[in-house]
């Protein structure tokens, strides 16, 4: 069923993150050059954001941390990350709060944000591990 497939895809992606199985790139441009275009009306989305990261470009610009999403879902996630929520209020925006979290915690939060924005289908059908 779809829930099992989604959970399996998330677990595979998380295992890839934990075990550094994805292919890393020195820049987002290099990653996009290797992967090509995300597709019609699609955009590449970093699950753990690339802004002000302490994790290094090879971790952030990694096939385990990128997913093709419809433009509208990508924009909805970006808007949510720019908002102030009750759990982030003491720090600021969701984006600022996320910067206080580990890579794995940010990755799981990002996957949940994709699901909440209506992108679960894209998690199941985007390889979150290197090919």
Image (cartoon, rainbow, N blue to C red):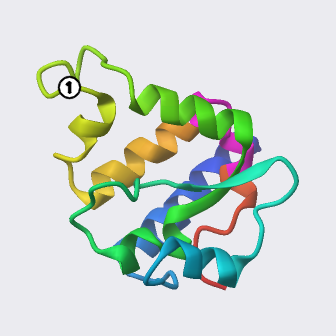
Identify whether 82 is placed above or below 84.
below
**Residue closer to the observer: 28 or 113:** 28
**Residue closer to the observer: 31 or 108:** 31
Q: Quadrant of the C terminus?
A: bottom right
Q: Going 20% across and 25% down the picture, which residue do you hit? A: 92
36 sits to left or right of 66:
right
Identify whether 38 is placed above or below 82.
below
Q: Residues within 10 Å of mark 1 (few under 14, many from 20)?
A: some
Q: Going 27% across and 42% down the picture, which residue do you hit? A: 98
Q: Going 83% across and 47% down the picture, which residue do you hit? A: 41
- The secondary structure type at the circle numbered 1 is loop
Residue 99 in picture, x, y percent from top left:
22, 47
98 sits to left or right of 125:
left
- Residue extending farthest to the left is 90
Question: Which quarter of the figure has residue 91?
Answer: top left
- Say which residue label 1 marks: 92
Residue 95 in picture, x, y percent from top left:
32, 38
Magenta span includes 101: no
Q: Which residues are magenta?
A: 115-122
Prevailing secondary structure of the magenta residues? helix
84 sits to left or right of 26:
left
Magenta span includes 118: yes
- Residue extending farthest to the top is 86
- Residue extending farthest to the right is 40
Residue 124 in picture, x, y percent from top left:
70, 54
**Residue closer to the observer: 71 or 85:** 71
Q: Quadrant of the N terminus?
A: top right
Identify whether 32 is placed above or below 40.
below
């Amino acid at each position: 069923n779809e829930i099992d497939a989604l959970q399996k895809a998330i677990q595979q992606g998380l295992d890839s993150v934990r075990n550094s199985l994805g292919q890393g790139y020195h820049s987002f441009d290099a990653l996009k050059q290797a992967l090509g275009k995300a597709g019609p009306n699609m955009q590449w989305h970093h699950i753990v954001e690339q802004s002000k990261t302490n994790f290094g470009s090879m971790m952030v610009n990694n096939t385990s941390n990128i997913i093709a999403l419809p433009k509208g879902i990508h924009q909805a996630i970006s808007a949510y990350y720019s908002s102030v929520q009750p759990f982030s209020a003491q720090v600021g925006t969701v984006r600022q709060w996320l910067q206080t979290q580990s890579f794995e915690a940010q990755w799981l939060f990002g996957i949940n944000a994709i699901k909440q924005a209506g992108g679960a289908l894209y998690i199941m059908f985007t390889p979150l591990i290197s090919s």
